[in-house]
């Protein structure tokens, strides 16, 4: 079961050293309009954050630093990771289908045979490391 958490709480907790957001649902529900909105991490410094198993599908990470983060098993489907620093991240088993990876630096990022990528994305050409 995923725990729902507000994006502002993530940023505030991260700023004081809490980097563990495993299995959290980082989408937020705007009750006044009854619409599901998606996390906005644009330009955020989230180096080393623990988000394994989290739901951040359709989130905005443009220009964010997630260097060294654990995103294994994370739902990043349709997320915007354009120009994000993803060097050394663990995305083993993550769902990146339909994600925008244009300009993202994935050098040294770990993936496995269960990691799902956008069509026509070549992890080896991006400098990623296949782990078994």
Image: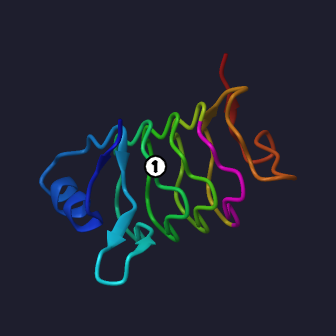
Q: Residue 80's spot in the image, x, y percent?
A: 59, 67
In the displayed structure, does residue 131 sit left or right of residue 4?
A: right
Q: Residue 34 at x, y = what percent?
A: 38, 76
Numbered range of the magenta stretch? 94-102
In percent of width and height, residue 93 lies at 60, 32
Residue 48 shows in this picture? no
Is the N terminus in the top left, top right, bottom left or bottom right quadrant? top left
Q: Position of residue 130 (x, y in %)?
A: 70, 27
In the figure, 85 relative to 102: above or below?
above
For residue 55, say whether it is visible: yes
Which residue is drawn at the image coordinates 72% and 59% (left, top)? 98
Which residue is drawn at the image coordinates 16% and 55% (left, top)? 13
The answer to whether 72 appears left or right of 1 in the picture is right
Residue under label 1, please give it.
55
- Kindly identify the residue that appears in the image at 43 percent across and 59 percent down: 65
48 or 28: nearer the viewer:
28
């Amino acid at each position: 079961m995923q725990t729902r958490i507000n994006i502002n709480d993530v940023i505030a907790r991260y700023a004081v050293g809490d980097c563990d957001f495993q299995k959290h649902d980082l989408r937020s529900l705007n009750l006044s309009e009854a619409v599901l909105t998606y996390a906005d991490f644009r330009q955020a410094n989230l180096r080393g954050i623990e988000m394994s198993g989290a739901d951040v599908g359709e989130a905005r990470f443009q220009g964010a630093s997630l260097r060294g983060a654990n995103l294994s098993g994370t739902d990043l489907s349709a997320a915007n990771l354009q120009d994000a620093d993803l060097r050394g991240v663990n995305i083993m088993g993550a769902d990146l289908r339909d994600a925008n990876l244009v300009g993202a630096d994935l050098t040294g990022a770990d993936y496995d045979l269960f990691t799902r990528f956008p069509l026509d994305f070549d992890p080896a050409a991006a400098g990623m490391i296949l782990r078994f």
